[in-house]
Amino acid sequence: MTEDDIGLKVLREAPAEAEAAQIIEYVQLPRLLAQTYSDPPSIIAVHGLGAHPDDSWCRNVGTRESPRWINWLEEESMLPAVAPNARIMRYGYQSQWFGKEAMQQSASTVAERLLRALKRKRKVPTVSDRRGEQVYWTAMCQQLSVSQALLEAEQYPSEWPGVFPSTTGLVFFGTPFRGAGGMDQMEMLEAARREYDNDQVQPTALEVLQPGNAYLQEVVDSFLKKMRGQTNKTQIACFYELKASDVGRIVGGQSRTASVNECFTTCEANCMHRGLWSARALAVSTYRTRRATEEDFETVAEVVEGMVNESPKLVWVRSQYHGKHKIDFRLQGMPIVGKFVQRNAEMQELERLLISNISTTIRQKVVVLHGLGGIGKTQLAVEFAREHYPRFSSVTWLDGSSEASLKQSFAGMVRRLPRTEMTADGVELLKHSAIDVDVAVRECLHWLSLPTNRYWLLIFDNVDRDFHNADDPQAYDVKAYLPNADHGSILITSRLARLQRHRSGVKVGTVNTEQARAILENNAGREIKDADIILKQLSGLPLALTQAGSYMQETNMSASAYTEHYDSTWERLMQRQGRFPLEEYGDRDVLTTWTISYEQVEKQSREAAWLLKLWGFLDHGELWYELVAAGSRLSKEIDTPRWLFEVAKDELAYAEAVGLLSRYSLADAREGSNSHSMHSVLHRWCGQLVEGEEQRDLGCIAAGIVALNIPFESEAEFWKKKKRLLGHALGVSGWLIRAYFSKEEETGVGMIKEGTYYNLGYILADEDRQKAEKMYQRALQGYEKARGPEHSSTLDTVNNLGNLYAGLGRLDEAEKILYAGLGRLDEAEKMYQRALQGKEKAWGPEHTSTLDTVNNLGNLYAGLGRLDEAEKMTA
């Protein structure tokens, strides 16, 4: 035996098509079982004492002179044909107990090395990766080492995850021999000592197999006890050979054979004698078979095939709870979720936190599923409960939207508790038609705290009210309703990110494009042409996608028509959508789902509520302190409200306000920065929170703080700062053009100063020239009126407008024709001429500002082909 022979070797990987080929339709079992059936099993072969890891499974089908060895583990017509979807492996170890290569390890060492090899090589089965390999391993093996390995795996499940519960079949072959009437172990040991030096013989390996050996008896007894204790027992088959073996030659001594009725191992004998019902004994002439048609192979194949086929169901059944506290699962109280789109990342994290090691972890598990309203927390919790309820003794859904509704949920729960496990007060309670909800809560918490009732799951849904808010009579401390016992599992859905502070948290974010498409089209009941434009607008928000799909189904509206309404009449569209209730979202819609969070914020902080409304006029992508802090400098231009002074006065005050928004999941902290972002649909909703004068005032404040944040070109990271402001400039300029200009013209009174318009035009000039033009034009009108046509500010604006028109003229020929028709190039020339005259008069012909305008005018003439005039400008 060489080093290459030692360890776990994959003889054949499961075929790529195994998953599709293995799926079994079994309508009586849950969906997860169908998934389980699709996962390929593993078969692991472990050789016996003194044998070779490969030769043990081989037989020569050739001649002595021209041998041809067949390994029935990997011969395509043999084991691979019996288990076509299985992964087949064999484990090799130093098993020689005499000679120069005698092993220096005990059975327990072999067992540990086997477990470590399994851990390294195999794909460890976890509930959080159902597509990974489920290891249903049928071990055709050396009995003692495998028995020891399984005992170790059962005792230390965290060290060897999944090995014991996923072992569904064991096949023991009849070596080494018990040897009661033939050549027993001690005779073999003496024979070896006659042939080899004492230091070349390891008697421990053989002595442990002597009948009556204390270690052997302990391992066998412990193994059988564990096997008998299984609710769903591992299948065991013991094969013994009918053909006598010349065991004397194994150690080089005289020929001695073992009689056929002495071929049981000690483990096998105990299995038979002690009535381990899952074990059965079968006779074969030899297990080194040559052909698939041999009777011996067919006997073994029948057993192995049966084990492989039963493995998925056995593993599934083992994962379920079978204790005395079992309460049948019901959908009572749960929202109806009929078209759930899988969210694998979040589901896998829930499974890791709540399912992994559920039978071995003693401490209570509390997981908070948190995120923005409408993000799909409740739907994910419902799907988790429906998929994994068999693993728990009970699954109870509690409405946590208010303390009153929570108590009513407990009142419903108490009616389902086993009467034999209730207190006298609880039994008396159920005799009355009207249930005292406080007594019901106490009774439920008592039942959940029973020492033997450890595997329940409580789901508190919509715990969205902060009990720190003393002004909210419906708020409560959820900790008061958690069982005191340190066991069980609790899942809380909430918009309150702070709930996860001392618990495990899973943040639920937006869905990806394919998931979003599935949600939209599932609810629309059809494939939607050009759906991408809607997906972009709704940015992966499940509630908005569900509502849009339902509305499109009811109205048969196209994607383009929906988008047009979304852009132009957002609030009216949302109101119309709200006419179609969404049961999976508790009949809430886009317009109402965030109201409760906003009201909670408003009660706790007036400043934070106003900041949220101001954000509706800015860009949703990023908000930071310095941007808002500029509000304290607006007093020179507009009447700055007190709340803005409070938020802008220092970074701590701002952090407190935006932190409150974050706690209610109305804002998200951007990783690696000191800024926050907001979902685009929520941002549209924020823009609808104010109207009339409040809308005008907030819009003007937003324009002012953006304009005041414009960096100087001499500042460090000028371009980075300018780019950071661009989204905000686009947002406020769009509002000014859409909603403000007309009112300003109607009243003749403007709240926004010309400098604000100038700065907005400056930052938009390279990105959106049409909006920049409108900003510059407003700035020019203001400067001319306030400071006159010859003022430097007026002339700078004229110059910048000239640059803008010139830029619009330097397009390809088609665009040149278009803009020439609009007179843009002529306008640019007029602007430059006016600026030049004004600057020469104000500062003289040699001033740098005058020369810049001369240069601009020369470039314009050159671009128009008027080279003589261009030459005059540059002379």
Image (cartoon, grey):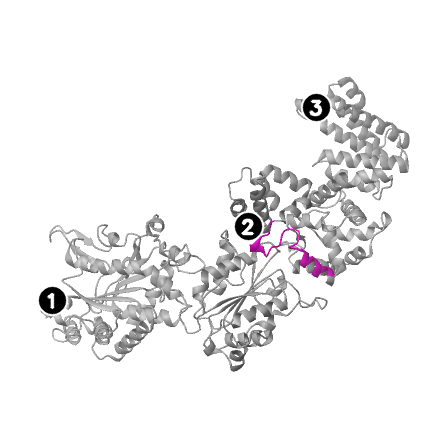
Estimate how packed mark 2 is, as few (under 14), some (14 to 19) or many (20 or more) residues with alpha carbons within 10 Å. Answer: some
Question: Which residue is disc 2 drawn over?
Answer: 511
Q: Quadrant of the N terminus?
A: bottom left
User: Type of residue at label 2?
Assistant: Val
Distance between mark 2 and mark 1 Cα atoms: 67 Å
Asked whether, in this view, residue 433 is left or right of residue 217, the answer is: right
Q: Earlier in the sequence, mark 2 or mark 3?
A: 2
Asked whether, in this view, residue 143 is left or right of residue 796, the answer is: left
Q: Secondary structure at mark 2?
A: loop
Distance between mark 2 and mark 3 Cα atoms: 43 Å
Q: Nearer the viewer, residue 735 or 580?
A: 580
Q: Say the numbered circle drawn on residue 463.
A: none
User: Type of residue at label 3?
Assistant: Leu
Q: Secondary structure at mark 1?
A: loop
Q: Position of residue 643 (x, y in %)?
A: 79, 57
Q: Nearer the viewer, residue 713 or 337?
A: 337
Residue 95 can be seen in this image: no
Q: Position of residue 23 (x, y in %)?
A: 35, 52
Question: Which residue is disc 3 drawn over?
Answer: 818
Question: Which residue is disc 1 drawn over?
Answer: 244
Whether residue 597 is in magenta: the answer is yes
Asked whether, in this view, residue 267 is left or right of residue 403, the answer is: left
User: Type of residue at label 1?
Assistant: Ala
Residue 114 can be seen in this image: yes
Q: Nearer the viewer, residue 607 or 419?
A: 419
Q: Earlier in the sequence, mark 1 or mark 3?
A: 1
Magenta part of the chain = 580-602
Estimate how packed mark 3 is, as few (under 14), some (14 to 19) or many (20 or more) residues with alpha carbons within 10 Å. Answer: few
Relative vertical location of residue 793 with respect to residue 339 in this rendering, above or below = above
- Tag 1 and tag 3, C-beta contact below 8 Å: no
